[in-house]
Image: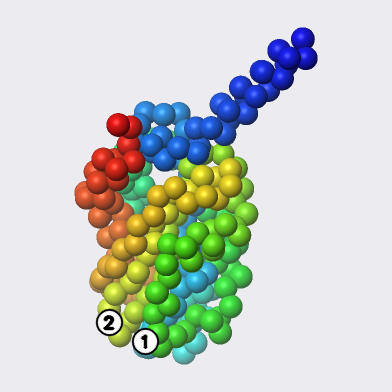
């Protein structure tokens, strides 16, 4: 009887956690839970003169952290038909859970935001950042972007898109993107940069990833 109970327990654990460990489940009809975790701005560098945006005030870095980190994340939730994560990866019923990323962003040190140089984060750097995070979701695959820089001087931004195993924060899929801002107002100007990441994944990268990581 003990052996039967043990086997049932093992099978249950495999059912709960085994699926989330396979990146190919992102490209199949698997029942693996997919969660959008948000955009991590806690390591971003602001390059150039951000205070010239009138709405940012004279303390550009502080306003960007206090207002726009959450504003940019909530824009995806509030205008979901435009910033469509489900369409991006061809999955229905994506779980939207950005509270953990919001807490991480809120702890960003203002004095570390402004910089003259791009940090040039590697895949290993991004993996180390994510490994330390405590997400509320502990099963399935998590999707997020890590912002590296918003460069006003060069008019470009860089993001690292990552799919992770939520049982241990292991990086399953990684890709970096450099995009151009545009639009009126600080929020929309930089929102275009991660919008273009979503569109690039939807129209180009997803197909390439499916060939690489999908079932053979």
Residue at 28% over, 71% down: 181
**Left or right of 65 on screen, residue 160:** left
Quarter of the view holding residue 185:
bottom left
Q: Quadrant of residue 156?
A: bottom left
Q: Name the residue under label 2.
A: 154
Residue drawn at point x = 32 percent, y = 82 percent: 152
Look at the picture and state if 54 lies above or below 74.
below
Residue lying farthest right? Answer: 2
Q: Is residue 3 left or right of residue 146?
A: right
Circle on res. 48: 1
Q: In this view, does 210 lie to the left or right of 42?
A: left
In what quadrant of the picture does the C terminus appear? top left
For disc 2, the neighbor class at 10 Å (few under 14, some 14 to 19, many from 20) is few
Res. 67 visible in picture: no
| Coordinates of residue 178 in the picture (x, y in percent) | 29, 68
What's the colour scheme?
rainbow
- The answer to whether mark 1 and mark 2 are in CB contact below 8 A is yes
Question: Residue 166's spot in the image, x, y percent?
Answer: 55, 45
Query: How far is mark 1 from mark 2, CA to CA?
Result: 8 Å
98 or 121, which lies in front?
121
Where residue 15 sits in the image (x, y, percent)?
A: 56, 26
Residue visible at 34% across and 62% down?
176
Determine which quarter of the picture holds residue 155.
bottom left
Q: What element carries label 2?
A: loop
Residue furthest toward the left?
Answer: 203
């Amino acid at each position: 009887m003990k052996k039967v109970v043990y086997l049932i327990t093992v099978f249950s654990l495999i059912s709960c956690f085994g699926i989330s460990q396979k990146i190919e489940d992102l490209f199949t009809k698997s029942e693996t839970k997919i969660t959008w975790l948000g955009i991590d701005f806690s390591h971003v560098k602001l390059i150039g003169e951000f205070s010239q945006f009138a709405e940012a005030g004279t303390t550009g870095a502080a306003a960007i952290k206090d207002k726009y980190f959450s504003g940019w994340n909530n824009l995806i939730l509030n205008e979901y038909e435009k910033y469509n994560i489900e369409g991006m990866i061809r999955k229905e019923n994506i779980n939207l859970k950005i509270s953990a990323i919001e807490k991480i962003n809120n702890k960003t040190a203002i004095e570390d935001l402004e910089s003259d140089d791009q940090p040039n984060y590697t895949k290993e750097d991004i993996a180390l950042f994510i490994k330390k995070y405590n997400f509320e979701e502990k099963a399935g695959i998590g999707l997020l972007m890590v912002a590296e820089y918003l460069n006003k001087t060069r008019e470009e931004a860089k993001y690292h898109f990552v799919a992770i195993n939520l049982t241990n924060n292991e990086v399953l899929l990684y890709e970096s993107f450099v995009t151009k801002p545009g639009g009126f107002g600080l929020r929309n100007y930089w929102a275009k940069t991660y919008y273009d990441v979503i569109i690039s994944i939807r129209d180009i990268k997803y197909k390439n990833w499916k060939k690489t990581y999908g079932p053979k």
